[in-house]
Image (cartoon, rainbow, N blue to C red):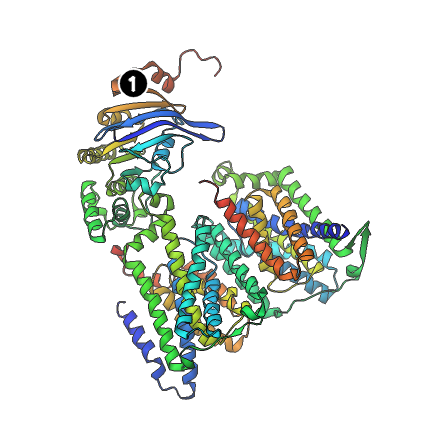
């Protein structure tokens, strides 16, 4: 029983990071209607920004989420202007291929720059844990959960309680209509893409704190993010929270209870994605 | 440009005979990799003509490679083991296709990506005595490892894939594939069996890729999940096809000649991370030259009878 | 009866788009469906051609129950369809667009047979001069011509046309009318949706009027246009209390 509670606690913590990473993707998909295959690499960029700030300037990674988010926000602006906006109106496959190319490029540039071996940081609080009843939770993961929840709450607040958020939702629902009532669709796309990318980068810093950073880390995350948003249904932001919880819980249980769980856990996601997609497609046309 | 194909063929036939002194082995080796890349890119292109973006060529390549290797190591005569490559890849793709081909563009791409990862993980986790686990297996070389013979076998494989690509272009399949890609619902209402068409393209593409995989083991010497099923090959395949020009036969071949040669040059300088170049090229082509290299020729002479 | 639909129904969520519709079409006949926007006319065509399945009802084509058949099979049995929002294959030439219909629309045709059929239809529909143009370079009127020609190339016995006159200038509509007449002369039965009344008057043997998913009148053009319910559907009644 204790083991199960511990597993659930781990799942909860992990779901925070997944929700943060996926919400960004869900935002990009829901508003711009393209799937950003490079989303995982944006997460990786955030992780590395935080890593270097920690190693070179001694800045605590949790604090680095601000510069990490800012760097990615700015970088995504450049990426949007130079590339994304030009494929938005074309065939869907072009956008997929473009973002796929961006992802591959970023990933391999990171390999060239930093080498493929994963990097880990060491902070004071990484080894301390908090005990809540039968469950023991590390301080670092707990902090990441708090950060994730706060940011997600902030994102929802912006989307549903501000004028800008309303504009974003309008563009998501009807691009032409929004344009006709005077909204600058291009600016909103730019802003939304920036927010989505920044969220990914911040999720990256969270991952750095709990696990580490490596050039290939993005790939696994982007597949999991896809699994989550597909399960939630494209465009359904609240569903992302539930789906993150489900996925994280499945992962945690496989890790704990399945012998040799590490590799099998990976296969679990991919199979989950696979079957969710297939299930959704087999609904009568 | 009609003479380009036969000319390239003549050049390819003569490669092992060119006196290059100490570099002879190296030249043949690089050219063999060009052939392999061209074949995989061409096979991917066949399937792309129905409008589906598959990110799983590496999975079928690997399945073909492993099928050959495992069979050969168990004493199956090499020619038979060789044919098991496309058979296994084709069979698996049939199952996968039936399940996933109803998915629309984006979802299909993700599903194939997920599938490719599952295959890789599965092969890593399988027991060592069955598939070599994460460590892999050493593949018995075809034709006893005879270098020149292997080169011509590779050329033969490429020619087979070229033939398939040309067949798709010059038969009724061209209309079925193109209509499916440009308007699925409309195609259906006009009587095109869209699902069967997509499935045919998918299985044909996978089987050919599996054939190349089985052949490639003689050049790569061993199969190992991380590399054989790695996404690198998928990226290379699609970047090559798109760079050269999708929906054409010349495009992927041209793309392979240029890009693989470039890659060989880069590899001398950068051990890893050269995939970045493929990523950059993919981005640049999509943004500035979506039709690929061959579209530069077509701008001058519109092929009216051919459509596309 | 060549084509017969009985008790055809389709709901989308809470909205009944088509309600227990019965009608039939005889060989060689030209039947028009008219009605206000949102009456369910296009949905009927979608149900007939197999774009989506009906919730209830049966569709029989020349004795064959096609209710559960997929769109491709219905086409092979002789049902041709031109869409309201034209969808030519953009990157293909006009000729290649028609070739798709000619190759796959009916019994297996060889490439040579399909080419002959395509030439026939190009001549019939006046598209011969534009055969080599990419479809995306055409103006709307010519796109609509291609849309219809493509359906004709499948050698249908029943042709379903959806507002083919919409958006056409008067002289373009006249030309299109001549093409439809030429097609009917080859013995094809036509079921068409139309808002341009003079086309309905000049072309239709029989007219069906729909409103809110139901058939509210049927008969000759004269019969239905004088029918009080039809007038009410289009124009409303004099005394409407706050509706």
Q: Which part of the image, by quadrant, shows the C terminus of chain B?
A: bottom left
Furthest toward the bottom, the residue is: B21
Relative side of C168 to B220, left or right: left
Count up the numbered dots. Answer: 1
Q: In which quarter of the image is residue A120?
A: bottom right
On the image, the x and y values in percent for residue C57 come to 38, 29
On the image, the x and y values in percent for residue A31 come to 54, 44
Furthest toward the top, the residue is: C239
Is residue C177 shown to the viewer in this render? yes
Residue drawn where x is 55% and y is 43% of the image? A235
Q: Is residue C228 above or below residue B254?
A: above
Q: How crowded is mark 1: few (under 14 residues within 10 Å), some or many (20 or more)?
A: some
**Of residues A73 and B154, which is closer to you in this image?**
B154
Q: In which quarter of the image is residue B245?
A: bottom left
Relative side of A257 to A31, left or right: right
Residue drawn where x is 42% and y is 77% of the image? B142
Chain to which mark 1 belongs: C
Q: Name the residue under label 1.
A: C225
Furthest toward the front, the residue is: B75
**Of residues B231 and C170, which is closer to you in this image?**
B231
Q: Is residue C190 above or below residue A197?
A: above
Relative side of A203 to C133, left or right: right
On the image, the x and y values in percent for residue A197 come to 60, 53
């Amino acid at each position: 029983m204790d083991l199960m509670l511990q597993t659930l606690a781990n799942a909860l913590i992990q779901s925070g990071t997944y929700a943060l990473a996926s919400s960004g993707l869900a935002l990009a998909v829901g508003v711009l209607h393209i799937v950003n295959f490079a989303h995982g690499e944006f997460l990786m960029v955030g992780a590395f920004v935080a890593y270097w700030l920690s190693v070179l300037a001694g800045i605590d990674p949790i604090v680095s989420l601000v510069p990490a988010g800012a760097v990615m926000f700015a970088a995504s602006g450049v990426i949007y202007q130079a590339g994304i906006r030009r494929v938005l109106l074309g065939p869907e496959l072009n956008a997929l291929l473009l973002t796929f190319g961006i992802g591959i490029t970023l990933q391999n540039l990171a390999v060239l720059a930093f080498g493929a071996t994963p990097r880990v940081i060491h902070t004071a609080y990484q080894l301390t844990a908090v005990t809540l009843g039968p469950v023991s939770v590390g301080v670092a993961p707990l902090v990441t959960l708090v950060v994730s929840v706060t940011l997600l709450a902030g994102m929802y607040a912006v989307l549903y309680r501000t004028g800008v958020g309303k504009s974003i939702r309008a563009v998501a629902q009807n691009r032409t209509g929004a344009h006709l009532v005077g909204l600058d669709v291009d600016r909103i796309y730019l802003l939304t893409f920036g927010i989505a990318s920044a969220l990914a980068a911040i999720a990256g810093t969270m991952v750095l704190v709990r696990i580490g950073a490596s050039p290939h880390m993005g790939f696994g995350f982007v597949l999991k993010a896809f699994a989550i948003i597909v399960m939630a249904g494209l465009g359904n932001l609240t569903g992302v929270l539930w789906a993150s919880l489900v996925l994280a819980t499945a992962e945690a249980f496989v890790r704990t209870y399945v012998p040799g769980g590490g590799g099998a856990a990976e296969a679990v996601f991919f199979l989950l994605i696979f079957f969710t997609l297939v299930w959704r497609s087999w609904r009568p046309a | 440009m009609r003479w380009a194909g036969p000319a390239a063929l003549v050049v390819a036939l003569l490669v092992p005979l060119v006196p290059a002194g100490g570099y002879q082995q190296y030249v043949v080796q690089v050219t063999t990799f060009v052939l392999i890349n061209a074949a995989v890119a061409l096979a991917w292109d066949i399937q792309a003509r129905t409008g589906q973006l598959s990110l799983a060529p590496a999975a079928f390549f690997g399945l073909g490679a492993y099928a050959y290797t495992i069979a050969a190591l168990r004493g199956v005569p090499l020619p038979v083991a060789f044919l098991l490559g496309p058979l296994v890849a084709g069979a698996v793709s049939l199952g996968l296709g039936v399940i996933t081909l109803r998915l629309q563009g984006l979802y299909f791409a993700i599903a194939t990506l997920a599938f490719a990862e599952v295959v890789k993980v599965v092969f890593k986790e399988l027991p060592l005595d069955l598939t070599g686990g994460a460590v892999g297996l050493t593949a018995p070389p075809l034709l006893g490892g005879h270098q020149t013979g292997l080169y011509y076998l590779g050329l033969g494989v490429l020619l087979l894939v070229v033939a398939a690509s040309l067949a798709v272009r010059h038969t009724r399949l061209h209309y079925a594939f193109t209509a499916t890609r440009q308007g699925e619902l409309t195609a259906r209402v006009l009587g095109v069996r869209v699902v069967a068409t997509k499935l045919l393209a998918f299985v044909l593409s996978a089987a050919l890729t599996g054939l190349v995989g089985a052949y490639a083991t003689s050049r790569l010497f061993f199969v190992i999940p991380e590399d054989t099923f790695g996404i690198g090959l998928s990226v290379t395949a699609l970047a090559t096809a798109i760079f050269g020009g999708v929906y054409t036969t010349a495009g992927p071949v041209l793309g392979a000649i240029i890009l693989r040669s470039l890659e060989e040059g880069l590899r001398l300088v950068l051990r890893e991370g050269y995939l970045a170049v493929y990523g950059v090229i993919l981005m640049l082509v999509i943004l500035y030259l979506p039709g690929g290299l061959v579209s530069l020729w077509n701008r001058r002479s519109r092929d009216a009878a051919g459509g596309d | 009866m060549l084509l017969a639909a009985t008790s055809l129904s389709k709901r989308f969520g809470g909205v009944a788009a088509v309600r227990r519709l019965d009608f039939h079409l005889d060989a060689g006949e030209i039947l028009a469906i008219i009605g206000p926007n949102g009456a369910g006319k296009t949905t009927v065509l979608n149900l007939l051609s197999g774009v989506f399945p009906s919730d209830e009802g049966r569709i029989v084509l020349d004795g064959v129950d096609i209710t559960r058949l997929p769109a491709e099979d219905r086409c092979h049995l002789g049902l041709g369809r031109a869409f309201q929002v034209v969808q030519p294959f953009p990157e293909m030439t006009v000729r290649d667009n028609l070739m798709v219909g000619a190759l796959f629309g009916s019994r297996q045709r060889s490439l040579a047979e399909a080419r002959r059929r395509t030439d026939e239809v190009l001549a019939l529909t006046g598209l011969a001069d534009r055969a080599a143009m990419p479809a995306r370079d055409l103006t709307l009127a010519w796109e609509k011509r291609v849309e219809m020609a493509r359906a004709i190339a499948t050698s249908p016995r029943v042709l379903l046309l959806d507002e083919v006159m919409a958006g056409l200038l008067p002289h373009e509509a006249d030309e299109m009318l001549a093409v439809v007449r030429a097609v009917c002369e080859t013995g094809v039965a036509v079921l068409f949706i139309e808002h341009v009344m003079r086309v309905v008057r000049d072309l239709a043997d029989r007219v069906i009027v729909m409103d809110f998913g139901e058939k509210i009148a049927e008969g000759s053009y004269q019969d239905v246009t004088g029918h009080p319910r039809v007038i009410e559907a289009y124009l409303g009644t004099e005394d409407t209390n706050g509706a």
